[in-house]
Amino acid sequence: MPNLRRRFLIAALSLTALGLVRHAVADDGYRLWLRYDPIVDDTRREAVAAAVPVLVLTTPSGTESPTIEATRRELQEGFSGLVGRVPEVRVRVGAGVDEALGDEGYRLTSRGVADGGGIEIRGNGDVAVLYGAFALLRRAQTGEDLARLQVVDTPRVGRRLLNHWDNLNRFVERGYAGFSIWEWFNLPDFRNPRYRDYARACASIGLNGAVLTNVNADALVLTPYYLERVAALAEEFRPYGVRVYLTARFSAPKEIGGLDTADPLDPRVIAWWDEKVAEIYRWVPDFGGFVVKANSEGQPGPQDFGRNHADGANLFARALAPHGGIVMWRAFVYQPENEMDRVRQASFEFMPLDGAFLPNVSVQIKNGPLDFMPREPFHPLFGSLQHTSMTLELQITQEYLGHSTHLAFLAPMWKEVFEADTFARGPGSTVGKAIDGTLRGHPLTVVAGVSNIGTDRNWTGHPLAQANWYAFGRLAWDHTLEAETIAEEWSRMTFGSEPATVAALTDILVRSREIVVNYSNPYGLHHIQARGHHFGPGPWVTGGRPDWTAPYYHQASEFGIGANRGPEGSNALADYAPELAALWGDLERCPENLLLWFHHLPWDYVTKSGRTLWDAIALRYQQGVDEMRRLAADWAALEPAIDPEIFANVSARMGRQVNDAIHWRDACLLYFQQFSKRPLPEGVEPPAHSLEHYMSINLRYVPGHPGDY
């Protein structure tokens, strides 16, 4: 009996580590949205149980592969948890390829009585069937009718990746949820169960790739010591359809290859990369390819040798092409000696190279032309590059939106990007269509998101930040989904289907990002965060290279505020289609949420509200504070419906966020008031401290930033 009890305890602990056991006391958030807790409503629970007595997995092979085993396990565990019954899962060979599904799409079909009842999940590959299984479980979790399913769903984008800015020492740059989950020292011998849970979570939202290392790359990851460990991670991810990618340091031939150059046109360098890539594929046969950051922020690149970005990208592309790999070449480039407006530099460097990149090159472009600001216009390259495949790079981790301390549901921001009209080929030429290949017919389509996960037990630090990981996956699969729909899905899957709770959570999520904009960067203000760590306000930041200072962007003076990007300023408007240049350049028609991005205006400029610009800015900061207080109160009202551990975690962060919103308002208004020389309007609370007090605050060792600032 003691041995039996010991074996049971070990098994229970193992299942808990895998997230497969319901938490009896408190929920620490580890299970993410894959909780599979019992459906409370008896009628709905019985309806779901009646719909899934038998589940048929139809694939071309019909074999019990590791992916099919994972699919069977997911379905049986999921429905066992949801309805208390374990469905029978059968595997059968499909009759030919279903052309409507492509490589990764799935079909869900309710089978008639004559066919034995239940639901068929069909795909043209095992991973497609896995995606279908997760979709079926999601529909059960969110209360959809499973009795008459006729669903076909295919991804709009081919490669849907998480970019991990993880260093080999396990520090995560711009990471706010602990250290990197990749335990390089323990690999390949010990494989943390978290690796499989990570891949499972990614597959549940349709993500099919992971870039394991920081864009500020370390060449050591390309050495055999690390490649053996990369291969172990790839093995863990493979059943869930998640391919591994790496970042490549351009100077690797010199640093680890013994060459005296990294010139992309040097035959020795070409031969070195050819062999290095071949070596990687010997370790990882389904390796996805490279992300490269070159000639930006001090990173080495082809311009160090008098070459251009196409020369550099094509070096990697030629080496990867025989193996089916791709290179994502980042367009986040700017040089301190370049006096051009920083938001124009990528267009200046990449537009002349349009069409010069090989077919397996995708230029990776941030959503906006600056740097993941709380709000900015879409990057002009999405409209101007005609002959080049493009990767949309989004930032899931909240570098400029309060880290993992503040709540900011980012789906509304990403929807702004996907739905933005570039006018590249007339009205309706949205960024989404430019990325998914429908606008220009590019076969290589990629969306990448900078990960927000780490070793924190709940993965993302802020429990509600899990919604951003979830939302990224859902939009990468289908960018036409509505932000509110995604928020409601996540809320139901994470906290249950009680209508009032779901409605309140959905509302809290959808409101949150605009609130952060209002109390930090309203009216198109940008890059006024504190230096280095970017947490909190820093409109006074000066010193060093100009484009790392705040006045470079807000240009506040006694005459007004804002960046003049029209013909009389930097003329960044010229990088966009004429329709947009005309719209944004016209003060009568320019959206006020981008007003100070494109225009330098006097303090007494009259806004659409009838107020002066100074009064409007001050009241918008106050609005952000008031909204944040209401958001915290709305969360507090949910206490009876939320697990105590999660409720306490979020409540503490909400309290900090309210105080931080006040800090933002007071610090920014006191700083800008020096120039406006106007009193705060009625309705704006007076600051509690002097400007000198706020400017003296010096946060040190802020998570996610390696320096001491």
Image (spheres, rainbow, N blue to C red):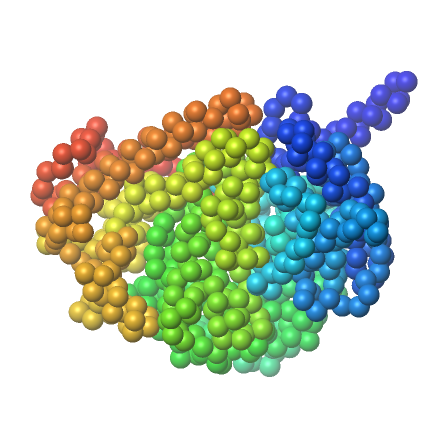
Rendered-image quadrant of the C terminus: top left
Image location of residue 637, percent across then percent down: 43, 24
Image location of residue 264, percent across then percent down: 54, 77
Residue 74 seen in the current view: yes
Number of numbered markers:
0
Image location of residue 666, percent across then percent down: 23, 35
Image location of residue 469, percent across then percent down: 54, 46
Kindly give the residue lying farthest to the right in the view shown: 1
Which residue is pictured at 75% across the width and 29% down the height? 13
Q: Nearer the viewer, residue 205 or 232?
A: 205
Which residue is pictured at 67% across the width and 23% down the height? 24
Going by the image, does 524 lie left or right of 294? left
Which residue is pictured at 70% across the width and 39% down the height? 48
Q: Quadrant of residue 11?
A: top right
Up-down: is 13 above or below 154?
A: above
Kindly give the residue lying farthest to the top in the view shown: 1
Residue 337 seen in the current view: no
Up-down: is 225 above or below 568?
A: above
Q: Nearer the viewer, residue 264 or 638?
A: 638
Which residue is pictured at 70% across the width and 69% down the height? 99
Q: Quadrant of residue 588?
A: bottom left
Going by the image, does 191 lie left or right of 345? right
Going by the image, does 238 lie left or right of 490? right
Rendered-image quadrant of the N terminus: top right
